[in-house]
């Protein structure tokens, strides 16, 4: 989404949405965001479909949503630590 023109090709999603979470647009134009987008992406790969289906278990969905939100809020911190580690 950071390449020029990418968001222009996907009018269903806003810059704010992609700044907040990963977005997955399916061929039927259904949009999934965050942990649900990751689960739906897994479901597109037959050998990993089982893992994507786990997201829809009530407790696992709640945990995955919270873990995704925390990771998304801290992603730049993780990137900074990763680049620091590579430069050592």
Image (spheres, helix red, strand yellow):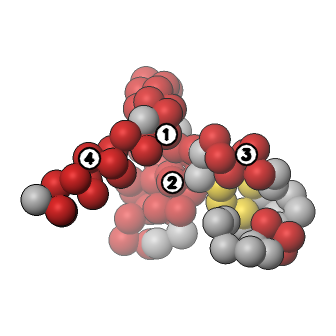
Residues under labels 1 and 3: Cα distance? 12 Å
Q: Are marks 1 and 3 in contact (CB under 8 Å)?
A: no
Q: Nearer the viewer, mark 4 or mark 3?
A: 4
Q: Can the viewer see residue 33 in this picture?
A: no
| Sequence-first tag of 1 and 3 | 3
Residue 88 locus on image (x, y percent): 10, 59
Residue 86 locus on image (x, y percent): 18, 62
Q: Are marks 2 and 4 in contact (CB under 8 Å)?
A: no
Q: Which mark is residue 38?
A: 2
**Is 32 above or below relative to 45?**
above
Q: Are marks 1 and 2 in contact (CB under 8 Å)?
A: no
Q: Classify residue 39 as left or right of residue 6.
A: left
Q: Nearer the viewer, residue 12 or 56?
A: 12
Please report the residue visible at 26 percent of the width from the left and 47 percent of the height from the top: 81
Instruction: Count neighbours of disc 3 (C-alpha within 10 A) and say few if under 14, some if 14 to 19, many if 20 or more.
Output: few
Please report the residue visible at 47 percent of the width from the left and 62 percent of the height from the top: 42
Q: Nearer the viewer, mark 1 or mark 4?
A: 4
Mark 1, secondary structure of its residue:
helix
Residues under labels 1 and 4: Cα distance? 15 Å
Q: Which mark is residue 81?
A: 4
Q: Quadrant of the N terminus?
A: bottom right
Q: Nearer the viewer, mark 2 or mark 4?
A: 4
Query: Which residue corresponds to mark 1?
Result: 72
Query: Which residue corresponds to mark 3?
Result: 17
Instruction: Count neighbours of disc 2 (C-alpha within 10 A) and say few if under 14, some if 14 to 19, many if 20 or more.
Output: some
Mark 2, secondary structure of its residue:
helix
């Amino acid at each position: 989404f950071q390449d020029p023109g990418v968001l222009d090709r996907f009018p269903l999603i806003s810059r704010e949405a992609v700044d907040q979470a990963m977005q997955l647009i399916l061929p039927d134009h259904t949009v999934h965001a965050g942990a649900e987008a990751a689960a739906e992406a897994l479901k597109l790969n037959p050998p990993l479909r089982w893992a994507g289906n786990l997201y829809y278990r009530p407790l696992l969905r709640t945990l995955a949503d919270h873990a995704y939100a925390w990771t998304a809020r801290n992603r730049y911190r993780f990137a900074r630590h990763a680049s620091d580690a590579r430069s050592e």
